[in-house]
Amino acid sequence: MRTLILPLFLLAASAGFAAAAIPAPASAAAYPGGNDSGEQGTASGKWDLPGGGLLGHVSGLLADSQGLPAYTLMGVLVPKLTSPAGAMAGELKGSLNQLAGPTTSGFALVHGYWKAGPLGHGHFRAVILDPGDPANGIPPYPIGFMRGKFHDPHGPGTPGLFKAHWKLP
């Protein structure tokens, strides 16, 4: 497992964090059995940063390259680092659900990291994972990625917005 140190170290140094590391999502391209569908598009929705000891939340819609709704995103934002100045960083843990096709149930997991400045501006990166089949010894594996920006100026309880790009290579 790779560990993301430099970008968070720079954030930590600029925001007064103690040094720490958060696991970086693996590259979807690094998995040879990844999805060959070539799907991609944009995503947007609500982004509610964590605070007051509570988890944050993200929810949104992923549209395909023609702008048609393809998946929904639901997830939690787990804080890992906070600074006295109000900057923070953490993990994104979520799932995608298909809106059409043979099944509209859970399609994939989404796992990544995010970081935000004291005014609620930030960015995130995540890997889209096939959940695998743990009962048969097949762990989750990367099939795509998502990255984007968010702005949640009002803090916990009043969601801001995010916009992103996603791809299932």
Image: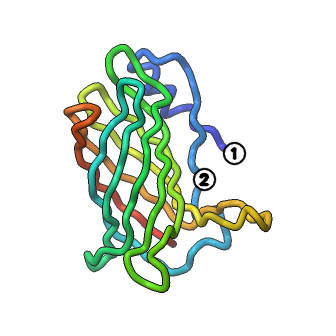
Rendering quarter of residue 14: top left
Indicate which disc, 2 or 1, sits on the residue closer to the N terminus. Answer: 1
Q: CA distance from mark 2 to mark 1?
A: 8 Å
Percent across and percent down for residue 78 are 47, 37
Residue 33 visible in rendering = yes
Q: Residue at 27% across / 50% down in the picture? A: 46
Q: Residue at 62% across / 64% down in the picture? A: 131
Tell me the residue that label 2 is attached to.
Answer: 26
| Crowd tier of the residue under label 1, counting other residues whose Cα lies within 10 Å: few below 14, some 14–19, many 20 or above | few
C-beta proximity under 8 Å, tags 2 and 1: yes
Q: Nearer the viewer, residue 107 or 129?
A: 107
Q: Quadrant of the N terminus?
A: top right
Q: Residue at 27% across / 79% down in the picture? A: 66
Q: Which mark is residue 1?
A: 1
- Judged from the image, the secondary structure of the residue bearing numbered disc 1 is loop
Q: Is residue 30 above or below residue 100?
A: above
Looking at the image, residue 106 sits to the left or right of residue 117; the answer is right
